[in-house]
Amino acid sequence: MKHERIQSLNNRILEEYTNEKIVLGDGNLDCSIMLIGEAPGAKEVELKKPFVGQAGKYLDEFIEVLDIGREQLYITNVVKYRPTKKSTKTDGVVNRPPTNVEIEKFKKYLIEEIDIIEPKIIVPLGNTPIKGIFEDNFKIGEVHGKALEINIKGKEYKVFPLYHPAAVIYRRELKAVYLDDLQELKKLMRKKC
C-alpha cells in the first residue's frame, strides 16, 4: 500500500515539474526515522538520490552516532529540485537556499510524504525543513535538539530538529552542539522506536 501511494505521489511531482531535474525521497518506507533536508545539491541531482556526495559524508556521521544504518531511514528534501544561482567566483552555478515560494509549492507534497511514511520521529535538518512542516516561524537556533510535536492529517508526530550537518562545516562552534543534539535524539529513539 505504501509503495503504491509513494509511487503515485512521485509521479505527480514528476508530472508537475517536467522542466526540473527532480530528486525524490529515498529509503525504507517502514522506517522509524525520516530525515528532511532543504533541497538536493549537484551530486544528488547527478545520482538522483538525496544525501550522497558531500552530504552523504555528513549522513554517515549522523548514522554512526545513532548506531543505525541508512537502510533504516527514509530521506527526502522539502524542495525536490536544486535551487541555483549564478556565481561570479566560479563562472558557473552554485546552490542557494530555497525561497519561501519554492518551499510553499512543495509543502503539500512533503506533508503527503510524511503521511505515507508515518515515521515515529521526523528530523528536519535546518530552517528550510522546519518551514516545510510547521506553520510557526521557528528558527533552528531556537528549536534544535528539542522534541516537538506536530499533527499531520490527524496523526501526532514527534519532531526533533537538528542543525543541518553542512552548517557545522561553516560554523565549527556548532560541532559540539550538533553531537550533543544527536545524543538526545538517540535517547528519544530508544523511547519511541
Image (cartoon, rainbow, N blue to C red):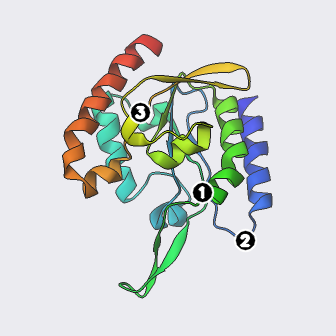
Residue 125 shown left or right of residue 12 in the figure? left
Looking at the picture, which amino acid does disc 3 mark?
Val
Q: Residue 23 appears in which quarter of the rendering?
A: bottom right
Whether label 2 touches label 1, CB < 8 Å: no
The residue lying at 47 percent from left, 30 percent from top is 72
Looking at the picture, which amino acid does disc 2 mark?
Asn
Quarter placement of the N terminus: top right
Looking at the picture, which amino acid does disc 1 mark?
Val
Mark 3 residue element: helix
Mark 1 residue element: loop
Q: CA distance from mark 2 to mark 1?
A: 13 Å
Say if 122 sits above or below 106 in the image. Answer: above
The residue lying at 59 percent from left, 26 percent from top is 30
Bin the neighbour count of mark 1 within 10 Å (Cα to Cα): few under 14, some 14-19, many 20 and up: many
User: Which mark is drawn over residue 23?
Assistant: 1
The residue pinned by badge 2 equals: 19
Q: CA distance from mark 3 to mark 2?
A: 35 Å
Q: Earlier in the sequence, mark 1 or mark 3?
A: 1
Q: Position of residue 103 (x, y in %)?
A: 63, 53
Q: Earlier in the sequence, mark 3 or mark 2?
A: 2
